Image: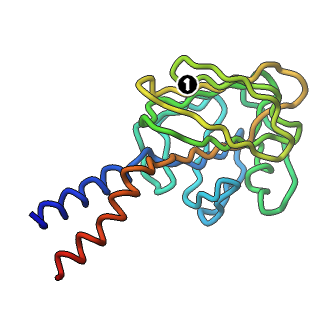
Amino acid sequence: MKKSLLILLLTISMTTLSFGAAFNIDFVFTGGTIPSSTFGGDAGQVGIWSTETAGGTGNMTDILGVVTSTTFNGGGFNEFVGGGDPLYEDLFRDRAAFDQVWQFEILNLDPGEYMFWLYAGPSGSGEFSVESDSVTTNYSSISALTSSAIPVTVTAGNRVFFLSDSSAGDEGVAALQIVPIPEPSIAALSLIALPLALRRRRS
């Protein structure tokens, strides 16, 4: 009985703590450098940074360096040379924005809750909308050379679509971090119960 309980708790813990892949993406027009894997950005998410280029499409590489089934489709890229905090230079200095109506979509994300950290270029992002599973939310412009955390829920649709509202000036975005949020309830319960089961097993 105790062995069965231990196996059940381990199974619950492992399944509830497994969640969608995480991504650090530096939008790049041509060339440029990307941040080190030790740089966690505003999301505090260390790991490999991958690049997406003008009109880019294809499978995305996660922060562990694994090529996933999640795909990126982009459009409206153009280039700028950014600046700002030296710690963020590799994000903002590498010709990584849009100066027209910008848009991109993420496909085949695992269902779940995410925080999308979107970084604006040196002229701000401009107003934009985010569509996920046929629900559209409008956002005001992100200030120049800063980021904003955007909560996103992915269910059966597995698609997240970003679209700018205008093409004024050099407004655009420079980078994106996709951070999955684990389900806390059952996982927390199982992690609390697991040491008790282990202690009983030893006694």
Q: Position of residue 51 (x, y in %)?
A: 61, 45
Name the residue located 83 percent from the left edge and 21 percent from the top edge.
167
* Quadrant of the snapshot with the C terminus: bottom left
Question: Residue 130's quadrant in the figure?
Answer: top right
Q: Position of residue 14 (x, y in %)?
A: 31, 56
Above or below, comparing residue 159 to residue 191 in the picture: above
Name the residue located 38 percent from the left edge and 54 percent from the top edge.
187
Above or below, comparing residue 108 to residue 34 in the picture: above
Question: Residue 199's quadrant in the figure?
Answer: bottom left
Which residue is denoted by mark 1 in the rendering? Answer: 132
* Quadrant of the snapshot with the N terminus: bottom left
Q: Position of residue 144 (x, y in %)?
A: 86, 42
Q: Mark 1 belongs to which amino acid?
A: Ser
Q: Position of residue 83 (x, y in %)?
A: 87, 52
Label 1 neighbourhood size at 10 Å, few (<14), some (14-19), many (20+)? many
Above or below, comparing residue 49 to residue 97 in the picture: below
User: Which type of secondary structure does the marked residue at label 1 adopt?
Assistant: strand
Name the residue located 89 percent from the left edge and 37 percent from the top edge.
123
